[in-house]
Image: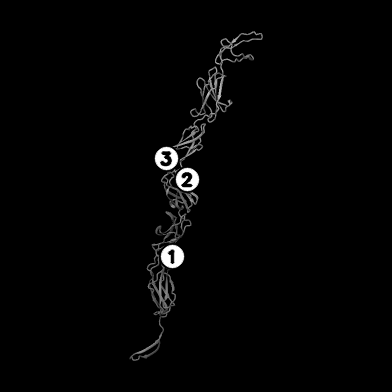
Amino acid sequence: DEGNQPVGSSCNPTSSGETWTCVVTELTNGKYYTAKIVATNGSDSSSTVTISDAVPVYGPPDAVTSINVTAGPGVGSQKLTVSWMAPVNVHGKELTKYVVWAMSSSSAISFVKSCTVVASVATSCTITGLTNGTAYYIKVWAYNGPDTYKGVATNLGYSPFTNPDAVTGVSVKERDVDAGAGTLKISWNKPFDGGQPVTGYTVTLTPGPRTCKPTAPTTTCTISGLQDGTKYTISVIATNAVGSDSEATTLQATPYSAPDAATAGVVTSGFAAGSQTLVVSWTAASSGNGRDIERYVVSAKLGLVLAGTCTAMGAIARTCTITGLANGTDYSIAVVTYNNYVSDLGSSATLSIAGAFHPYTVPGVPTSVRGAVGRAGGGNGKIRVSWTAPSDNGGNTITEYTATAKRSGAVAGSCTSSGATTCDITSLPNGQEYSLQVIATNGANSFSAAGNSASTVNPYGQPSVVRSVAWQCIPNPIQPTICASGELMASWTAPAATNGRSIQKYSLTLTDTTVSGSPAVFTTTPSVLTYDFTGLINGHEYRLAVSAINSTPSEEESIGNAGSPGATTNPFTVPKPPVIASVAATPDQTGSLTVTWTR
């Protein structure tokens, strides 16, 4: 009742066991009422009246209005902040709280997360623990009692989001062959977008500054016109659809271009390099064009096939040795300068050394070394040395041979030839024994071992002139006081000098100058200095030349000197008795006879 006056509608109680319930309507919200309960039975007798405490009457409040949902970095990651206007009418009782739901759909059964605030304190609250980028429907409940409330939902979904994550995987290509010098090519990985799609990126270089702004989904950026060798700080920022920026990812890089090539390449082979080896030297590249020279790589190619290589590290390197090559094989040589640890064309420059180069070693030993003397050797004081070329030239053409004559181990003379396998050693003392050796040369300081002669040789020249050639009459054995018929004896004196070789024989050339014909040749032993000629024609004139020979037939027997002046004579004997033809007085001459005869 209200003021001990009954109000409201009557009600029909219902029971559940010992509990009875009755709902009285048509009361006024906001007023306090007491309830009187009278129990009666069928005889209309009543029990004691029970009176309740005064309680207020109220209904569910109106729904909130002007719901506003905020997301983004200002709210925080995985959060939505919801605000609203309080209900206009709370229907009899002040509001106690607000409960805000986040739902995956407009259906209440899709509840995900919630937040609660005291109604007298705030008309907003923040739902946490959501998933960035996922759309949520929002429903706000206003409570003015445990079981009296009113809720209202949004018609749209709202997504929590935050700034994009910082980009990752940032890499810089400091040398771009296609873009040219002074270029940096930056690339990165797409970051998590924070709940809103990434729409673009801002790349900034300092000093400069220089920027580029590629739009998503592009994750590369090329900035040109930079200074090779200058260090730049690079910053990459991602921006999402609502203009929210990520934290900057920074790194440093230095653009560079291909280095200059090395110059003045020189290839050394032979003795200075070693067998199967080429030593390559050069003048260092003048500039690394933005980066220090990292290494030089030298290659030897046989045609297009790589045959050997060597690497010299550092900018100050000037030489490199390629080993394991084939002696005598021509190779092309190139020196490649790198200013990057990666062997790419954009980081290198090549010096191709003009010409073909082959390694070589010392040649083999000359064989069959021998010496010719006398006429075969060229004559007085000479040895003509000959030999067989080595079967192995060591990989390089033999350019010179040196032949040496030694006596008692000391060099007495030598000669050289430019590839020929013979030369003459001159100005040697005749009559001395010499051993011979020959060395082959196929390059600077590249000598073979010595090839030695099997025996010694001694040079010699022709002897001096036979002296005192003379004719003598051979006594007639019947009448010794007269010459024998058709016979003469020649005598001579040995030469004053034999010039290194003893006389082997004398050669006598007898010419009949009275008639034409071939001369006759006779020989004597070296100890005989006379010769008896027989069978001559009395009265014919003969010329005799005597030569001293100090060579043997195997040494071309021809070294000698004729006797001087090569005297002429004619043989004779006792004439026959004359036959008197007549004896008569001489006419007109007193005291005279004229005698005539025949021989």
Residue at point 39%, 89% (across, down): 582
Q: Is residue 294 above or below residue 519?
A: above
Q: Residues within 10 Å of mark 1 (few under 14, many from 20)?
A: some
Where residue 527 sits: x, y (%)?
41, 70
Q: Earlier in the sequence, mark 3 or mark 2?
A: 3
Q: Amino acid at mark 2?
A: Leu
Q: For mark 3, what is the residue? A: 230
Q: Work out whether residue 150 can be spotted.
A: yes
Q: Earlier in the sequence, mark 3 or mark 1?
A: 3
Describe the element under mark 2 as helix, strand or loop.
helix
Q: For mark 2, what is the residue? A: 345
Q: Is residue 238 above or below residue 518?
A: above
Q: CA distance from mark 3 to mark 2?
A: 21 Å
Dividing the picture into quadrants, the one containing residue 234 is top left
Q: Amino acid at mark 3?
A: Thr
Q: Is residue 212 above or below residue 349?
A: above
Where residue 426 sits: x, y (%)?
40, 62
Relative to 385, is 128 on the left or the right? right
User: Which one is closest to the eye, mark 1 or mark 2?
Assistant: 2
Dividing the picture into quadrants, the one containing residue 63 is top right
Where residue 140 sits: x, y (%)?
54, 24
Q: Are marks 3 and 2 in contact (CB under 8 Å)?
A: no
Q: Residues within 10 Å of mark 3 (few under 14, many from 20)?
A: some
